[in-house]
Image: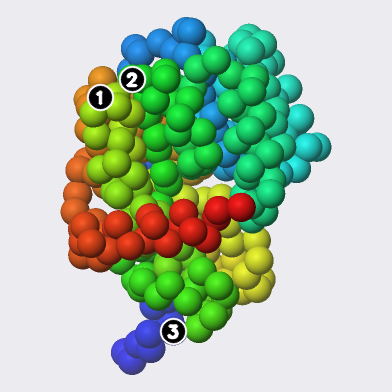
Amino acid sequence: MNWEWSDIYSHPLWMVSTAILAIIARAQRKALWDPRACPVKLNGKTAVVTGANTGIGKFIALDFARRGARVILACRSEARGTAALQEIRESTGNQNIHLRLLDTSSLDSVRRFAARILEEEKELHILVNNAGASDLLKKSAPARIVNVSSMNHWRGEVNFDHFHGHNLNHVMDATYNHTKLHNVIWTNELARRLQGTGVTANSLHPGVVMTDVMRNYNFIIRFLFNLVGFFFFKTAEEGSFSPIYCAVSEEAEGISGKYFNSDCSLVLPAPPSRDPALGVKEYEFCERLTAK
């Protein structure tokens, strides 16, 4: 009897066994560190979380709120930010949740946001993904800065022309990869400059997460991403585990200038981010670029 591969793939037993294997793979996807098992409380602490109206950012803000922190949601959309604020308040019972508008693509918006935080907040203990109020963090030490990068930073390259929009390759995720590499380089240099202040700065990879980050890709790519992701990728809540670990866990206390993977383990980042001279150059370049 002659069999064709198409006969095998179309056989009901093949489809059933594939589905069972996928379900088992999804069920076995467990984090090594679970924030729900972490007893740390944040009463009396203030935290700023950018992009907190959706995805990973919202789950981070939700966790901080459950721990009793005063949480500031830094969001671009007032409508979506307000919806997230109400949801977090209702879910946690913590009414000390506040919305501040921030468009990170606009330096003017970043400056207004930072100025308002400095004016309104007496202390700032946790900063997730925003680097506009380091002076206040120093006054509030011990404090932590957490920058969400990606394992894709290994595929990025350093070209300072990119900061001016030159020589960029917009194919797939090339620009994203470059940006995530700069996140790690800059964070490591920031950590070096914060030594002795009581403020730590670390970067991390949250995992391959099912969020709306793919919303700008075409339908076919989004469909394949969502299909595979349903079984093998992390949910937005699971993607928040490593940022929360860096921000609140006792295990991460005092650690600075490091890179964590999605299992909350310390790993080496890409070689360029381990180059101290490059870190100094990038930091000073960014200072000049963002100066008024």
- Secondary structure at badge 2 equals loop
- Please, which residue is most extreme toward the front here? 292
Residue 53: mark in rendering: none
Q: Is residue 134 left or right of residue 103?
A: left
**Residue depicted at 29% across the width and 24% down the height:** 198
Of residues 66 and 170, the one nearer the viewer is 170
- Please, which residue is most extreme toward the bottom here? 2
Q: Which residue bears the numbered disc 3?
A: 6
Dot 3 or dot 1, earlier in sequence: 3
Dot 3 or dot 2, earlier in sequence: 3
Q: Are marks 2 and 1 in contact (CB under 8 Å)?
A: yes
Where residue 95 sits, quadrant-wise, is top right
- Neighbor class of circle 3 (other Cα within 10 Å; few <14, some 14-19, many 20+) is few
Q: Is residue 59 above or below residue 11?
A: above
Q: Which residue bears the numbered disc 1?
A: 253
- Under mark 1, the amino acid is Glu
Of residues 64 and 271, the one nearer the viewer is 271
Alpha-carbon span between mark 2 and mark 1: 9 Å
